[in-house]
Image: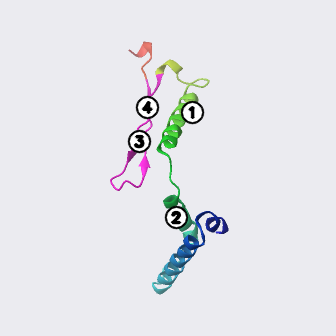
Amino acid sequence: MKLFAERYGQEAYDDMLVEINTRDKSAESKDIPKDPGEIAKLIFSEIVKREPVDPSLLKKLADDRAQSIAEQMTGPDGIQSERIVILPSEESTDDSGESVSSTLGLDAVPSESQK
């Protein structure tokens, strides 16, 4: 929690504590068991809101992931490397614009004997 306050400021940290206390009180009043990971989940969601992610880094991550998968698939006893095609990664968001997902663009081309 100290790191959160150092990075985002004392005011953001205090606001988060107020939200935690508010959630604790509402959970007690409804006899809902407290989630032991709730504080970690709240901190994670606050960090996600505050940390911008460069789309070019996400694209590079997707490209590197596809390359790594292709390398695993073409290892010993794997598919011939000529049969693996890595398609360009595409950026997409859901309707709310909050989450980013990608589809792995990897395909195995039929071998000469399968044509």
Furthest-bottom residue in view?
29
Q: In this figure, what is the number of numbered marks?
A: 4
Tell which circle, 3 or 1, labels the residue nearer the N-terminal end.
Answer: 1
User: Which residue is pictured at 54% across the width and 73% down the height?
Assistant: 16
Q: Residue at x 58, y 30 (%)?
A: 72
Amino acid type, callout 3: Glu
Residue 71, x across and y down, in percent: 57, 28
In 3D space, how far apart are the residues under numbered discs 1 and 2 (Cα atoms)?
A: 31 Å
Residue in view at x 43 percent, y 13 percent = 113
Mark 2 or mark 3, which has the lower sequence index? 2
Q: CA distance from mark 2 to mark 4?
A: 32 Å
- Circle 3 residue: 91
Helix, strand or loop under label 4:
loop
Q: Nearer the viewer, mark 1 or mark 2?
A: 2
- Tell me the SS state at disc 2: helix
The quarter of the image holding the N terminus is bottom right
Asked whether disc 1 touches disc 4, contact meaning CB atoms under 8 Å apart, the reply is no
**In the rendered image, which quarter is residue 105 located in?**
top left
Q: Which residue is mark 2?
A: 46
Residue range (magenta): 84-108
Q: Do labels 2 and 3 touch, CB within 8 Å?
A: no
Looking at the image, which residue is at 43% across and 46% down? 101
Q: Which residue is mark 4?
A: 88
Q: CA distance from mark 3 to mark 1?
A: 19 Å
The image position of residue 89, as x and y in percent, is 44, 35
Q: Which residue is tagged 1?
A: 68
